């Protein structure tokens, strides 16, 4: 369906075709600041020189000649040509479009089946899945969902942190202070306790760091005991993580972590050597990146490889394995320099597709205004938060709707949705203050508010005993028009959200729609009204769009609450 901006641009082009292209006209059309000035406005300043006429006169003369069934009137206002959308025709068209396309309303096809890989979540094994890991997981998953909505094939990769010196430290801590029984009973909290204890003890006795490095060297060398303990830590960690991913409705196509690339890094070092890119610097091997970026460290003085070596190996592997059109890394803002270096090294290696690698950064989740730290034990565990908020949601449901069927499932959907939405409603580059109280509010810009709005729409349709497939008449009143405007904006909001890697755009779109619908509901009689069939069609359109929008954010939409 064409947008009203396109209809207006075509009408203007028929009059100004000698002077402006339809593309240029479309670019110049804007939304008036005041509703009384219409829905769309075209500024005539750009034509003044060519027509040797004042913009006010151009607007007045053109407005007399521009006629289009999609607009109830077109008039001049100073140097602007203002168009008022024909509400009856537009509202009918928008509702029909939603009812016809259902969950596919807002789909785009510019992705054309091309593949995008998403590097997201990536927690470290043997450490708790904290609220700090939440952002990469839900932001990455939402952008992946949006990419599929736009026609791409999304490959979700969980690049698990399962290698490095910290595992030598943990193995040492387990052998010295741990027990198999304690780890079996409660794996992640016990491993977290051991990890924290190691760092506390190492502050008093720095020689413990040498012990940790020694155990990691044994792991690298394939020592059977170190390998057995490491594999056990990895298994219990992934089991714990998968419970959380199930709660969050997040799935992955690959769980290949850092260890997967151990046998793939030598080839990268050899290729860099063959291409003359490796330079020795104080005993280490680096790739120099010019004046704008510091050198990229490939091998330390002791011969150990680094994150950069591993990320180069993973980028090359993913290109071979998936032949991606784009490769997105949903990783915290503090890694920006690292990804600039990786891209630059790949370019120097001769890979043009390096320009298709994109770092999607985000801010931090703060607790009491401070960054969460696993090492210092200042951490909020995501699983604990989810359990607590689901319990709170169930208490609310028991209080407001004790006879609700599937109370436990609805509580899970509301609690998890509250956590996800609280994160995604913020622009991803902003830091987010952790607040369980704010998450679960049923008023304002929250997940439960949107879910409740969807449930309200479903309730109206249940009471009516039907869900219309078509709309019989349009709407002209302000309350209905606000809902129509929000519905019609959804497809473009989807496009913008994906292109700007900004799920908050979808959250904003849904909140605007929910507010408009709830005002419409408060002001309008629906069941038993003269225009009942069309009003029910509008209600159904709202339910469809809210449900689909929440799905894109990774949130379920209960039919009853």
Image (cartoon, rainbow, N blue to C red):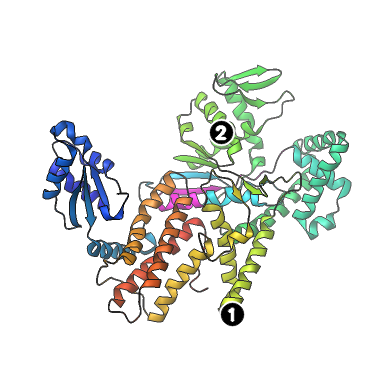
How many neighbours does mark 2 have within 10 angstroms: few (below 14), some (14-19), or many (20 or more)?
some
> Label 1's element?
loop
Question: Which quadrant would residue 220 be assigned to in this image?
Answer: top right
Toward the viewer: 182 or 221? Answer: 182
Q: Residue 459, how many percent across, how many down?
A: 44, 76
- Mark on residue 142? none
Residue 206 visible to the viewer: yes
Q: Give left or right: position of 462 versus 180.
A: left
Residue 3 visible to the viewer: no
Q: Which image quarter holds the N terminus?
A: bottom left
Toward the viewer: 348 or 15? Answer: 15
Residue 148 colored magenta?
A: yes
Q: CA distance from mark 2 to mark 1?
A: 51 Å
How many callouts does the rendering have? 2
Q: Residue at x 85, y 34 (%)?
A: 206
Q: Residue 495, how many percent across, how many down?
A: 39, 49
> Label 2's element?
helix
Residue on which disc 2 sits: 339
> Which residues are the magenta region?
142-164
Do callouts 2 and 1 mark residues in contact (Cβ within 8 Å)?
no
Question: Disc 2 or disc 1, which is closer to the eye?
Answer: 1
Q: Residue 180, how many percent across, how many down?
A: 84, 54
Residue 80 colored magenta?
A: no
Along the polypeptide, which appears first: circle 2 or circle 1?
2
Q: Give left or right: position of 357 versus 392.
A: left
- Mark on residue 402? 1
Above/below status of 10 relative to 443:
above
């Amino acid at each position: 369906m064409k947008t009203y901006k396109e209809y207006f641009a075509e009408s203007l082009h028929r009059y100004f075709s000698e002077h402006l292209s339809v593309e240029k006209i479309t670019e110049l059309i804007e939304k008036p600041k005041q509703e009384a000035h219409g829905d769309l406005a075209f500024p005539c300043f750009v034509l003044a020189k060519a027509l040797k006429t004042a913009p006010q006169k151009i607007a007045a003369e053109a407005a007399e000649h521009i006629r289009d069934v999609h607009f109830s009137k077109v008039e001049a206002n100073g140097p602007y040509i203002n168009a008022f959308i024909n509400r009856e025709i537009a509202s009918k068209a928008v509702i029909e479009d939603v009812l016809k396309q259902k969950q596919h309303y807002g789909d785009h096809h510019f992705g054309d089946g091309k593949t995008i890989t998403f590097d997201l979540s990536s927690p470290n094994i043997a450490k708790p899945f904290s609220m700090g890991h939440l952002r990469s997981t839900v932001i990455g998953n939402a952008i992946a969902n949006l990419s599929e909505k736009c026609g791409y094939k999304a490959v979700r990769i969980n690049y698990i942190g399962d290698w490095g010196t910290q595992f030598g430290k943990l193995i040492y801590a387990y052998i010295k202070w741990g027990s198999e029984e304690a780890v079996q009973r409660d794996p992640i909290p016990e491993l977290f306790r051991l990890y924290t204890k190691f760092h506390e003890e190492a502050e008093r006795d720095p020689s413990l760091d040498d012990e940790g490095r020694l155990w990691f060297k044994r792991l690298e060398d394939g020592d059977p005991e170190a390998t057995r303990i490491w594999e056990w830590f990895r298994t219990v960690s992934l089991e714990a993580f998968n419970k959380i991913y199930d709660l969050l409705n997040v799935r992955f196509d690959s769980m290949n972590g850092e260890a997967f690339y151990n046998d793939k890094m030598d080839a990268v070092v050899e290729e860099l050597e063959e291409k003359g890119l490796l330079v020795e610097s104080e005993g280490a091997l680096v790739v120099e990146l010019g004046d704008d970026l510091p050198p990229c460290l490939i091998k330390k003085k002791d011969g150990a490889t680094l994150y950069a070596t591993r990320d180069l190996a993973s980028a090359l592997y993913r290109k071979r394995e998936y032949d991606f059109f784009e490769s997105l890394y949903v990783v915290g803002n503090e890694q920006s320099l690292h990804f600039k270096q990786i891209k630059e090294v790949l370019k120097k290696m001769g890979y043009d597709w390096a320009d298709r690698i994109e770092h999607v950064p985000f801010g931090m989740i703060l607790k009491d205004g401070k960054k969460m730290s696993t090492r210092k034990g200042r951490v909020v565990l995501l699983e604990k938060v989810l359990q607590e908020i689901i319990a709170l949601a169930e208490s609310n449901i028991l209080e407001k709707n004790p006879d609700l069927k599937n109370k436990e499932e609805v509580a899970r959907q509301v609690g998890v949705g509250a956590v996800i939405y609280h994160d995604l409603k913020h622009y991803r580059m902003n830091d987010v203050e952790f607040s369980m109280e704010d998450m679960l509010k049923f008023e304002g810009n929250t997940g439960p508010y949107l879910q409740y709005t969807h449930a309200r729409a479903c309730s109206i349709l249940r009471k009516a005993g039907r869900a219309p497939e078509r709309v019989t008449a349009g709407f002209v009143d302000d309350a209905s028009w606000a809902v129509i405007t929000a519905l019609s904006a959804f497809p473009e909001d989807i496009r913008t959200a994906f292109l700007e890697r900004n799920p908050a755009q979808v959250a904003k779109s849904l909140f605007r729609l929910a507010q408009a619908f709830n005002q419409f509901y408060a002001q309008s009689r629906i069941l038993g009204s003269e225009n009942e069939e069309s009003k029910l069609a509008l209600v159904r359109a709202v339910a469809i769009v809210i449900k689909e929008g929440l799905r894109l954010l990774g949130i379920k939409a209960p039919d009853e609450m």
